[in-house]
Image (cartoon, helix red, strand yellow):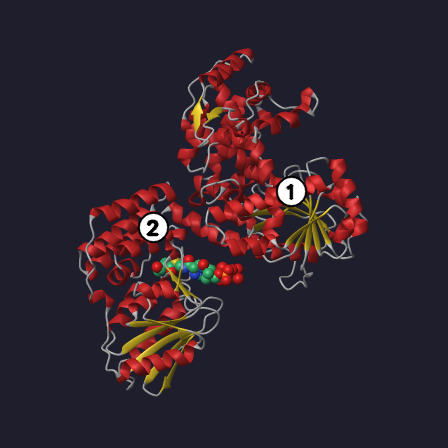
Amino acid sequence: MNDVVSYVMDGEIAVVTVNNPPVNALSQAVRQGLLDAIRRSADDGSRAVLILCEGRTFIAGADITEFGKPMAEPYLPDLLNEIEASEKLVVAAIHGTALGGGFETALASHYRIAVDSAKVGLPEVKLGLLPGAGGTQRAPRIAGVAASLELILSGAPIPAAKAGQFGLVDKVVPGDLGAAAREYVRELLDAGTPVRRTSEQAVEAVGDDVFDTAAASVAKRARGQTAPHRIIECVRTAMTTPFAEGQKRERELFMESMQDPQSKALQHVFFAEREAAKVVGIDKDTPLRDINSMGVIGGGTMGGGIAMSFANAGIPVTLIEINDEALERGLAIIDSNYAGSVKRGKLSEDKAADCRGRITGATDYAALADVDLVIEAVFEDPELKKEIFAKLDAACKPGAILATNTSYQDVNAIAAATGRPEDVLGMHFFSPAHIMKLLEVVRGDETADDALATVMKLSKKIRKVAVVSGVCYGFIGNRMLQGYFREAQLCLVEGGSPESVDKAMFDWGMAMGPISVADLAGLDVGYKARQALPADERGDPAAYRVPDVLVEMGRLGQKSGKGFYNYDPETRRPSPDPEVQAVIEREAAALGIERREIDAQEVVDRLIFALANEGFRILEEGIAQRPGDIDIVYLYGYGFPAWRGGPMHYVESVGLDKALARIEEFRERFGDENWAPAPLLEKLVAEGRSLKDWADRK
Ligand code: T1G
């Protein structure tokens, strides 16, 4: 066949093996090899064809690296139809994760056997696509409409046993798949089992209510996304039309999805997330330090959440507090978090007890003498942090990594409080730390490569998505957020209302509007930070007078039952309060602001371009390694819609020239201080270059 698909006779069975690391993606060569193999089997005396894969998984899908390039024959749908049309029995043997086009290949086979650890799925929707090689037409013919809608709309893989219950897999075996698969084929042959073509089966009809339920769940779960609606149409077509016609419609809608900016954004996210794990200039085989135990300084909300993240990953934790009373309080936070996870069905009682059992408390740093990593998570007092790091330097063994969870302070200054700056870095978790996936890993000037590489690898173990940041105020996410919140407050005081500003951003795709986020975080956080600054260093009063007045009125946000909104004490449901609108109007007048109508597009452009403008500066300064890293920060830490790709991808998709023109318009209207365009953005527009081209320049 070719160098990625082999063909060996085993008695009467043609064994076709795909070997295309790392995940046996359906590259053009694999498709060609499979086509040659199925054609060869037609007249070589074989009675059956067994398709299996080398390496860690059965085919994990189409080759995403080929997307965006001219499609090369053989096209996958045609190849799979030819496999299904074979007169010889075709059996697929699945291990690892048979996903997307990989599972479609198995569905086009006549029978499917899987090892019990295998999973199957159709995750195309996560790429803004839909199964484009017959999956939307074959799955309903086997598993029925409702199960297929759930499988394809969720994009979530299911275990082999569950697939077996739906008939998507015919046999599930433990242990050696190769031998079991050969035996299974021989059993089928001995029993004279006929070929079974899924396309010839009918779909069991269901009522509109099934599709309506699916549409309702999409409206909630995938708000703003286009592919899910195309998927529902494909599955409905499978139920109402013959296979060939249904597959034609599937192809049309697949091609429509491929052209959709949402799919380009989600494909960008797929690769950006994997790129973010790589550190420029550090060899991927850098020897790592062992992390078998760790300590957390500070048992507050963050410290407790961090301790849980490690305990849940099987790493013993020593939680340090200043005295027994504070330690009890800290451990009580952890106990209530675990109880909550059990109540919500996230963890079983046993699992929660196991994890909780890995956390012990102490008030003496001597308990940290042997740990491999310590994360400091006390409140944002720079002097206290330096004091703590000096103590850690003395208490911890050589080579222990000392990390600070600070959300904006100078990691270099903290490192300088120790005699081992090479072991110091930032690990900035997002609240709640045991749930939010983003982890900003802050690289100090002297952070050792192996310490950084160790923490990047460790982040996967504690199920975090890590992004490297350089040292600056607010690192990547919070530094960019300042402009975003500034513009939200200015839109509010210049003519908006909490609801209008929130609605503009929520409708655009943000998980939560900025005013609601401010209430969630607590208006007193910013208030205290500003009170600590001289008046002339607090920025534009128009951007903070309203929240500060609310704080002085005791309206701290959700934590006090009211902030910009009033919150129902039971449900926490927000409702507008005319008293707040009166404050907004009064403060606007006091600031000499003549309020005006501000449309949703202006709100979106001011908030998102403020984000991206700062993102260009962050790239220029080398704080972020690449534009995609900034996008990942915003997707995993700030509720930015993945189907818009992230702030930097979004601005590139709008057009850097258009973005610059809009920023220059805002500079005209609102002044240089907030809207001076980032030099990198100006440079790229002047040179007619894309941000991707600049990022690939290295
Ligand atoms: N194509 C190309 N490369 C891929 C790939 C793919 N489908 N999947 C993974 N890789 C690369 C990945 O970039 C990384 O590269 C390496 O493999 C290891 O991946 C017609 C159109 C399979 C569960 O969406 O979910 O089929 O960084 O780090 O954590 O209807 O990869 O090492 O250079 O993620 O063990 C549908 C996507 C495609 C599956 C393994 N399939 N992949 O996870 O390793 S669309 C998918 C995954 C489709 C058809 C449609 C995961 C994984 P590098 P990794 P992992």
Residue sitting at x 65%, y 42%: 330
The three-letter amino acid code for the residue at tag 2 is: Ser
Q: Is mark 1 within 8 Å of ligand 1?
A: no
For discs 2 and 1, the disc positioned in front in the rendered view: 1
The three-letter amino acid code for the residue at tag 1 is: Gly
Is residue 13 shown to the viewer in this render?
yes
Label 2: how many residues lie within 10 Å, few (<14), some (14-19) or many (20+)?
Answer: many
Percent x, y of residue 322: 74, 41
Say which element carries label 1.
helix
Percent x, y of residue 185: 32, 80
| Above or below: residue 268 compared with residue 615 | below
Upstream in sequence: badge 2 or badge 1: 2
Q: Which residue is mark 2?
A: 257
Residue that extends furthest to the bottom in the rendered view of this protein: 11
Q: Which residue is mark 1?
A: 330
Task: Quarter of the image for the N terminus: give it.
Answer: bottom left
- State how far apart marks 2 and 1 are (Cα): 49 Å
